Amino acid sequence: MKPNATMDRREFLGATGLLTGVLAAGSPLALFAPGRAWALDLKALTSQEGATLLAAARTIAPHDKLDDAPYALVVQAMDSSASADAATLALLRNGVSGLGAGFADASEAKRVAALRPLETTPFFKSVRATTLMTLYASPLVYAYFGYEGEAFSKGGYLLRGFNDLRWLPEVPLVDSGPVFGTG
Amino acid sequence: MSSIQQDDSNAVVIIGSGAGGGTLAHELTRRGIKVVLLEAGARQSLASFSQVPGEAFAQLTWLEPRTQSGSTTVAEDYPTLPSWTAKTVGGTTVHWTGMALRAHPWEIRARTTYGAVDGASLIDWPVEYEELLRYYQMAEKRMVVTRRNGNPGLPASNHFKVFHYGAKRLGYKQVHTGYMAINSRPTDGRGLCIQQGFCVQGCKTGAKWSTLYTEIPRAEATGNLDLRAECRAVRIEHGADGRATAVVYRDPAGSEQRQKARVVCVAGNAVETTRLLLLSESARYPNGLANSSDQVGRNYCHHTGCFVWGVFDKPIEFWRGTTLAGLVLDETRHDPKRGFAGGYHLEMAALDLPSIALAGLPQTLWGRELGFVMDHYRSMAGIYVNGEDLPRATNRITLNPALKDQFGLPVANIHVDDHPNNDAMRRHGQQQGKLMFDAAGAIKVVMSRQTPATHNMCAARMSRDPKDGVVNAHGQAHDVANLFVSDGSAMSTPSSANPTLTIVALALRQADYIVRQLSTRAL
């Protein structure tokens, strides 16, 4: 993902499609992005196919307050597999074509209804797996979910809140143990 | 560190450097025995462990192809990953969670305790519990297990507060932060647990016991160990007398090498241990090495492994803190009134953000329900149901000639049809986990299906009668006197305990036996 690209550069790269978006004002993702507008070149999929797969990813793992940008990373991962493997491209292309041209703009209820009968198909399983694998692994979304990632460099949580929960009673020492260095 | 000649037929060759192989290597080398330790994986260090979840998985995991068959949901949900084992120096002790549990006395007499269960191939262990207990205690001392030998327990994390509160509300009596081979204070030259939550990615403080930074460097310091990393054993050879003579392996460049051996110990984790024995077939042993009983690969056990996730409306942040330091022991008993034989442990379990979606939640979950659960990631708690599964002769690891690895060798196929007892225990355990979370105020509870097994056991089991198993009470092959199985494959039944402590205890016991046998020239 990068700031909005020009058509000339895209033609030079031989891109087949383009996904674009704008980060919502105040999005935590803005911390990571150089500007609010983003664009993603597709190497194997068309823009239309990319938009359909982005809508499928959003339907499978819906987070209303999460920007399109991390979902675009999912499409990028699918595009990358599709450009490396003709069978994957065919799987995605046929699946997308089965969903129809109106899928990306359809209501969520209609998108769910379109995907539900496909649950056991290789197409759906592949889209679901790539969505989960890519979306939740992206440091772009850690802040949204509250996840803090690696903590070794910060000394872990021993003195930074591993036991700061106060809405339940404390555990008797006999069932736990002393916090080293604080007793 | 030592260099042992490939034609030195005095060497003990150990295949695999995990809980069994790494411990055995140290025990033999410290008593003056020359050991060649072959490890398929690369050598990492505290500094090189990746702290990026997906990257760490790729760094430590056996990702070469395996296939599976049978009726478990694992075959449906994880078709390319039937089990989750390690390929790295230190083996699964690098990615384990540190739960160091003993099997119970009645569990090692499973056939006697549970009786004849239809469709199960139960046997009793050919080991007395008193003797096993002695080795458990040695293993606990060596691994610095909490709540044993005066070591304090790990402190309660936010996650454990939820786990403990729910368990106590439900009436459970034995609930604590576990018997963990994770330092609650600096001990044995290793750091203490800083509650960072990255246990399975490789512990960067070394607080968690692993052969990678305990047994193996100590074995190297004796001058008797020749560790060969990124070397894959592909075949065990034997002589005219039927005894093992050498191990053929591929070096890091992929070239074939041959190490002569006086004794061969296989500790490649049950799947690869089985595969290596089967690959070592010959005119004399047409069904594979140590397999005249046709038991190699049979009776494969994997525990009931599944999760329960509680979703709460207040923050928990369960990624902060030791991943698995929470334990309910009350269900670890044989009580047929519950509708199944054997028992299980309820173990607190957290997963990082990508892993919970990929491996923690049911693979059938998507749409608004998935979105709701993941939106509550910071308010989640987890339980892993670790229960004893029953062995079946037809649950079997075999070679799959339809798929070959990079050396042209057939990969392993894992066939599992779970015994109905496992399903009943899993349902019971997940329901109890749900009640715990309900009691603690959960707004939603989600149950996983089975996950790829990290506990792979019993596929080359110890048996009194050579017809029932592959090795004797010391892990020595019934068929081949100088061939040993030194990992979880040798367990006669799986018990409800996470297997690492038992594997270490059996390796210590096996080391004593091998030393005695070598000193009397019996080997």
Image (cartoon, grey):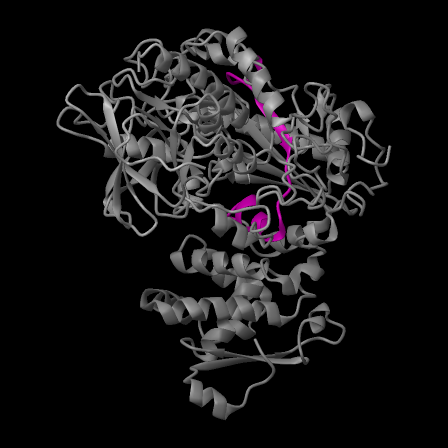
Task: Report the magenta residues as a range.
Answer: B336-364
In front here: B164 or B458?
B458
Work out whether residue B436 or residue A72 is closer to the camera in this orientation and state it. A72
Determine if residue B380 is in view.
Answer: yes
The picture places residue B55, in percent across and down from the top left corner, at 53, 54
Determine whether B96 is above or below A76 in the image: above
Residue B211: percent from the left, percent from the top? 52, 34
Q: Is residue A44 left or right of residue B289?
A: right
Quadrant of the snapshot with the N terminus of chain B: top left
Total tally of numbered discs in the picture: 0
State the image coordinates of residue B69 (x, y, percent, origin top left).
33, 38
Horizontal relation, residue B68 to residue B55: left or right: left
Q: In what quadrant of the picture does the C terminus of chain B appear?
A: top left
Q: Residue B496 lies in what quarter of the image? A: top right
Q: Nearer the viewer, residue A122 or A130?
A: A130
Q: Is residue A99 visible?
A: no
Q: Residue furthest bottom?
A: A8
Residue B346 inside the magenta-drawn segment: yes
